[in-house]
Each structure stands twice: as structure tokens, then as C-alpha cells.
Amino acid sequence: MTIGIIGYGNIGKMISENLLKNNIVNEDELIISNRNIKKLDAIKNYYPDIEITDDNIMLSKKADKIIISVESNDLLNVISEIKENLESKHLIHTCAGVSFEDIEEVYDGSVSLVIPTISSSFTESDKQKGISLIVHNSKVNFLDSTSLENMFNNFSYVKILPSEKDIEIATILTSCAPAYISLIVKKFAEYGFDNSDLDYDECKYLILKTLIGTSEVLSKDSLNSEDNCDNLINTVCTPGGITEKGLNFLDLESDTMIDDLFDILLQSYND
Ligand SMILES: NC(=O)c1ccc[n+]([C@@H]2O[C@H](COP(=O)([O-])OP(=O)(O)OC[C@H]3O[C@@H](n4cnc5c(N)ncnc54)[C@H](OP(=O)(O)O)[C@@H]3O)[C@@H](O)[C@H]2O)c1
């Protein structure tokens, strides 16, 4: 089974590395295409048996499954370029904001959308992390859908959505959120650095370890309670204490901020 990946940017690289480093595909079962082929030199040096190219048509002839991970505006052009060679092949893309209806205008075969996240980037310590959202169009058969879900389940937690209806909100929660979480970590660490004798890396370490610990506690407890966020908040906040004052402030400010954030993001899907 040969997998072809078109587009070796942030996401194409993350998927390729996971496929190779987790031994999901053999080197000689992977073809990667990128517009600027120079970008593929490093991975080719590390994995000499993979095939690299800037010829999407050649890739589409050789690959059994094709994952397209180009900028969303380029997706339909790439599908048009390769569609003669798709026959009954399973086409997979990661391009946010492109609907199955948009794709049907140029190609009417079996198509799956995967919204991966940069949080699933390969690390030695923890193989499965981050969420991959998957939606299939009505033409994807059982074998192809299962094989795709299993592939991403090797290195991420797969969430299958029954339709595209909730994909935009889910994308914000899983694929945009790493950027927002990183910003919050950075802002906390910067404040600590600017206002204490701790250096930036020490402050970042303190907040990161707290973030990881908090997420583990919430994940563990969530198996046996309805919503443990409030429980954790109440455990940390002593009535009248400093945490509670901060919490009241954040609670007030964050409702408007989160509403505005989602408004901006959902509006930009329509632009
Ligand atoms: N970044 C994320 O966290 C994330 C998460 C979920 C979904 N997505 C979606 O995934 C897609 C890719 O995102 P990204 O962040 O990986 O983008 P990116 O870093 O800009 O990568 C896009 C890659 O596609 C290549 N490319 C463009 N046109 C091509 C063509 N015709 N043939 C071959 N290669 C071509 C570009 O090559 P050059 O090097 O020559 O420019 C570039 O390497 C986007 O549609 C995005 O909406 C991204």
C-alpha cells in the first residue's frame, strides 16, 4: 500500500514523520510531493528509500491513497490536476474551510476530511496525543474509512464526526487551540520574568508543568464525574483567597473574550 502526501508544510511534515517514526508505513511505501522540492531534502537524507517529487501527477499515478495538505485555497487546483488518476482511490485532505460540496464541483469520488493538529507532532515519550477530526463523504467505503481512522489513531485520538455540521467549532477546539494555549503560556511566563528574579524559561517550566498536571487531573477524573472543572476550581479557590479574586475577574472577562474569539473565527470561515 503506497501512501502519497501532497504538501509538505507544517501538517504534511507532521503526518509524514508520524507515519515513518511509528512504523505505520515503510520508507518505500511513502511518496511525498512539495511545490518547492528543496524542502524535502532533509527527510530524504534521513529516509533515503522514500520517494520525493514535485510532480503531483506522477505521485497520483503511483499512490494507492493520497493525502493532500496544501493551503486551503490551492486544494481544488491540486484535485483538478490529479483527478484523472484517482479512479477508485481514497482521497484524503486536511484543508480547513473546504466543504465536500466545493470538492464535488471538481471531483465526485470518495473523499475524507481529516483535521489534524500540530499537538500530534511526534515525540518519543508519548505516541498518541492531540485530536484528529475525521469526516467522510457518503462515497467512502467501510474499509477505507476504517483504515484511515486506524492510521491516525496510531499517533492521535480520532474523533469521527457524522457530518461537516460541527467541523468549524471542533476545528477551533482542536487545531486552532494549540496556538491560543501557547499564547497564554507565553503571556504568563513573560509576566513572571518581567516581575520576578526567575528567568523566562523557569517561568515557562512552572506554568507548563502546571498545565500538564491540570490536564491530567481533569482527564483522569472526567471518567467518573460529570464535569470536574468546577470541582477543581473549588478545590483550588479558598473562599476570599487570592485565587478566588483572580477567578472572579477571569470569569467576568473571559465570557466576552471567548464569545468574541469564536465570532471572529466563525466569520472568517465565511469570508
Ligand atoms: N497548521 C495547522 O495546525 C493545521 C491544522 C489543521 C488543518 N490545517 C490545514 O492543513 C493545510 C496545510 O496547512 P499547513 O499549516 O501545513 O500549511 P503550510 O505550512 O503552508 O504548507 C502547505 C504546503 O503545501 C505546499 N504546496 C502548495 N501548493 C502545492 C502544490 N500545488 N503541490 C505540492 N505542494 C504544494 C507548499 O509548498 P511550498 O513550500 O512550495 O510553499 C507547503 O509546503 C491547510 O489547508 C490548513 O487549513 C492546518
Image (cartoon, helix red, strand yellow):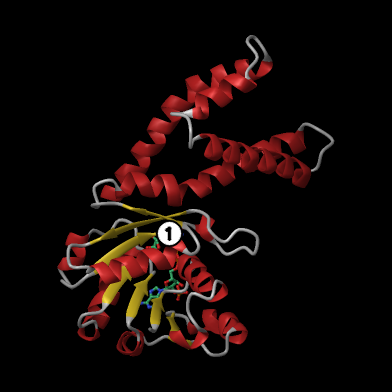
Seen as rendered, the residue at the extreme right is 197
Q: Is residue 64 above or below residue 254?
A: below
Dot 1 amino acid type: Pro
Viewer-proximal residue among 103 and 269: 103
Graded by Cα atoms within 10 Å as few (under 14), some (14 to 19) or many (20 or more), the crowding at tag 1 reads many
Q: Please give the residue where the numbered disc 1 appears in the rendered image.
A: 116
- The image quarter containing residue 263 is top left
Q: Is residue 200 above or below residue 157?
A: above
Say whether mark 1 is within 8 Å of ligand 1: yes
Please state the horizontal and vertical placement of residue 108, each as a whole percent of the image.
Answer: 15, 71
Please state the horizontal and vertical placement of residue 237, each as a whole percent of the image.
Answer: 62, 18
Please state the horizontal and vertical placement of residue 156, each as a whole percent of the image.
Answer: 48, 58
Is 211 on the left-hand or right-hand side of 192?
left
Residue located 59% across and 41% down the image: 216
Residue located 20% across and 85% down the image: 84
Residue located 74% across and 40% down the image: 203
Q: Quadrant of the N terminus?
A: bottom left
